[in-house]
Image (tube, rainbow, N blue to C red):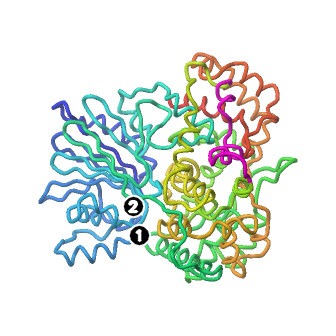
């Protein structure tokens, strides 16, 4: 787990070491253990290391094959690297290290760009070979990869902030991305970002850049959501999912040369991870929970659910209770670590939790992805029950933060245009190989929306403290299996039916039968007091007015009734505006 960066020049000027140094400085928190650069003609690669597998210098990066001058920088973890290593040795390759980095390098030398199809894990990497730069991102987009291009060069990095540090980036706002951002609760699907000059590689995609500056994208993985030719009973599906999830958890505990813990929220997903790890006989299992101050409308912690799970399995449990004053004080730090603006209330929570966890372990397992893969959110049954309109209409009615007319009332006229998000979602829902509407929705959530919401959030906030988060529910083999399962086995029991069946007897009934919860952060949901003053100061600032992103009448309407304007999934519209403007100010 690391931070990577690189520059490929097309103008006969060598990439500069000081430019790379500025980029790597922005990635230092992602990789606190070591730094390296490698220059070869038109390319310079950079790396910040978080040592998890093969802690020796032999796995330092950039890693170079001396015989071919092929160089690699890599961020992530390859869970099947021992098997691939053995296969490559059988094909005549000699290894000089014991980690997964060299396996990628030699897999590329053996199979070329098809090597990505053999990798199981989370990854973003770049390989330089003579006159070609090859980049790849894992199937579910767990690891980030951003890039910028100009007439003279191509640059890439793990964060937009590293690209901004290199200079020369067009930071004007992408109007289409802005529409996505305020419609899909801060999700801007690849390849766009809010900045016109920065793009991101889509999940399950490779990118080849040649010496002329030509970019060739190839999608190497897509998800089918169709029933298998031989039907299975509910019991058979439950057994198959249980076996696949058990294997996903096992892979993510075995492949590490450091201690691995669990982020235990008190929900079904993380509680089930604890149970499965205990089932595997993991010794001295460590769990971590965070809570916040209550509000009259909502409790600020889930300790009443996480405590019994920790007690049931005798984990070494760590609890952290964060006062509201600390949340507001630390909010600027968390925003600084957001690669892109994030509306979710739990972004700050994960930042503060990761700070504490990183003092004890370097790797944690987390339950992200279970709701999207197994249909856990309240809006899925509502969409399924909707019988009127197109697939887009059924989705929009229960999910979009703002319909197009409201976006036009919110955004300044310079950012007006067609309903770009409606067009995008309709196209994704209409992709082939999905049997029914809920199959389409869950596939889109899993392969597009989740990437730039919970997955990116957890990556950013944990890596800010040099902490690697592993997400077993997004194991691509488990995801493929779950996508072929009938939707009713997901939506029954108020969502995640098959996971609840697996959990029965392994997790306290109170955790399984509770109403679906969300990471409680009441102070950012019920906007009042110091938090309201904070948001008002941002939106009334001269910087916000000069930027001219919002129409003032819309801003004033929200400020006049800050607790009255919520999205369909109960987000604060005022927080959306304030957070976006604040992020732009912090990253100017």
What percent of the width, then of the height, locates residue 266?
71, 65
Q: Secondary structure at mark 2?
A: loop
Q: Is residue 117 magenta?
A: no
Disc 1 crowd, CA 10 A, few/some/many (<14, 14-19, 20+): many
Query: Do labels 2 and 1 touch, CB within 8 Å?
Result: no
Picture layout, residue 169 above or below residue 471: above
In screen coordinates, is 190 left or right of 41?
right
Q: Quadrant of residue 549?
A: top right
Disc 2 crowd, CA 10 A, few/some/many (<14, 14-19, 20+): many
In screen coordinates, is 34 left or right of 203?
left
Question: Any mark on residue 79, and which?
Answer: 1
**Discs 2/1, front:** 1
Q: Residue at horizontal 18%, vertical 31%?
A: 13
Comparing 58 with 443, the one in front is 443
Question: Any mark on residue 324, and which?
Answer: none
What percent of the width, then of the height, locates residue 393?
66, 44
Picture layout, residue 374 above or below residue 46: below
What percent of the width, then of the height, locates residue 176?
52, 31
Number of numbered discs: 2
Q: Residue at horizontal 62%, vertical 45%?
A: 392
Picture layout, residue 406 above or below residue 325: above
Question: Label 2, on which residue?
Answer: 51
Q: Quadrant of residue 258?
A: bottom left
Comparing 341 with 283, the one in front is 341
Most common SS among magenta residues: helix
What percent of the width, then of the height, locates residue 244?
52, 76
> Farthest left residue?
67
Q: Secondary structure at mark 1?
A: loop
In screen coordinates, is 526 left or right of 244?
right
Q: Quadrant of the N terminus?
A: bottom left
Region in magenta: 386-409
């Amino acid at each position: 787990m690391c931070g990577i960066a690189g520059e490929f020049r097309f103008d006969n000027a060598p990439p500069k070491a000081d430019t790379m140094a500025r980029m790597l400085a922005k990635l230092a928190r992602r990789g606190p253990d070591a730094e390296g650069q490698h220059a070869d003609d038109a390319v310079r690669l950079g790396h910040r290391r978080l040592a998890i597998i093969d802690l020796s210098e032999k796995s330092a990066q950039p890693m170079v094959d001396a015989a071919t001058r092929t160089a690699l920088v890599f961020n992530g973890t390859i869970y099947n690297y021992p098997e691939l290593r053995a296969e490559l040795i059988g094909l005549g390759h000699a290894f000089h290290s014991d980690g997964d980095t060299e396996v990628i390098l030699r897999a590329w030398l053996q199979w070329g760009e098809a090597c990505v199809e053999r990798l199981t894990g989370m990854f973003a990497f770049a390989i330089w070979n003579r006159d070609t730069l090859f980049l790849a991102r894992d199937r579910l987009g767990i690891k980030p990869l951003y890039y910028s291009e100009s007439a003279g060069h191509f640059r890439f990095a793990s964060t937009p902030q590293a690209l901004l540090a290199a200079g020369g980036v067009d930071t004007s706002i992408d109007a289409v991305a802005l529409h996505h951002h305020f419609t899909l609760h801060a999700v801007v699907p690849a390849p766009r970002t809010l900045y016109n000059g920065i793009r991101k590689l889509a999940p399950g995609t490779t990118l080849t850049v040649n010496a002329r500056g030509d970019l060739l994208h190839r999608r190497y993985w897509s998800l089918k959501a169709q029933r298998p030719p031989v039907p299975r009973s509910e019991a058979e599906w439950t057994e198959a999912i249980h076996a696949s999830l058990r294997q996903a958890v096992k892979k993510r505990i075995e492949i590490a040369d450091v201690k691995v813990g669990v982020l235990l929220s008190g929900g079904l997903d993380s509680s089930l991870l604890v149970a499965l790890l205990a089932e595997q006989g993991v010794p001295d299992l460590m769990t971590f929970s965070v809570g916040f101050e209550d509000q009259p409308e909502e409790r600020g912690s889930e300790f009443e659910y996480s405590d019994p799970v920790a007690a049931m399995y005798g984990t070494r449990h760590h609890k952290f209770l964060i006062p509201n004053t600390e949340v507001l004080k630390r909010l600027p730090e968390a925003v600084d670590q957001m690669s892109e603006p994030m509306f979710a209330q739990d972004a700050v929570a994960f930042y503060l939790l990761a700070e504490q966890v990183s003092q004890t372990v370097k790797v944690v397992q987390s339950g992200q992805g279970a709701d999207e893969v197994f249909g856990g959110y309240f809006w899925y049954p509502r969409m399924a029950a909707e019988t009127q309109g197109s697939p887009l209409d059924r989705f929009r009615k229960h999910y979009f933060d703002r319909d197009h007319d409201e976006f036009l009332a919110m955004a300044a006229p310079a950012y007006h245009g067609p309903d770009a998000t409606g067009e995008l979602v309709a196209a994704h829902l209409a992709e082939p190989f999905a049997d029914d509407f809920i199959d389409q929705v869950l596939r889109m959530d899993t392969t597009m929306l989740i990437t730039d919401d919970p997955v990116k959030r957890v990556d950013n906030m944990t890596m800010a403290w040099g902490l690697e988060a592993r997400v077993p529910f997004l194991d691509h083999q488990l995801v493929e299996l779950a996508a072929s399962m009938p939707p009713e086995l997901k939506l029954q029991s108020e969502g995640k039916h098959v996971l609840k069946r697996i959990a029965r007897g392994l997790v306290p009934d109170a955790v399984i039968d509770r109403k679906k919860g969300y990471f409680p952060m009441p102070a950012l949901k019920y906007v009042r007091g110091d938090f309201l003053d904070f948001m008002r100061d941002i939106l009334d600032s001269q910087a916000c007015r000069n930027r001219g992103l919002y129409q003032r009448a819309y801003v004033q309407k929200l400020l006049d009734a800050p607790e009255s304007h919520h999205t369909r999934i109960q987000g604060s519209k005022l927080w959306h505006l304030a957070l976006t403007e604040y992020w732009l100010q912090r990253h100017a």
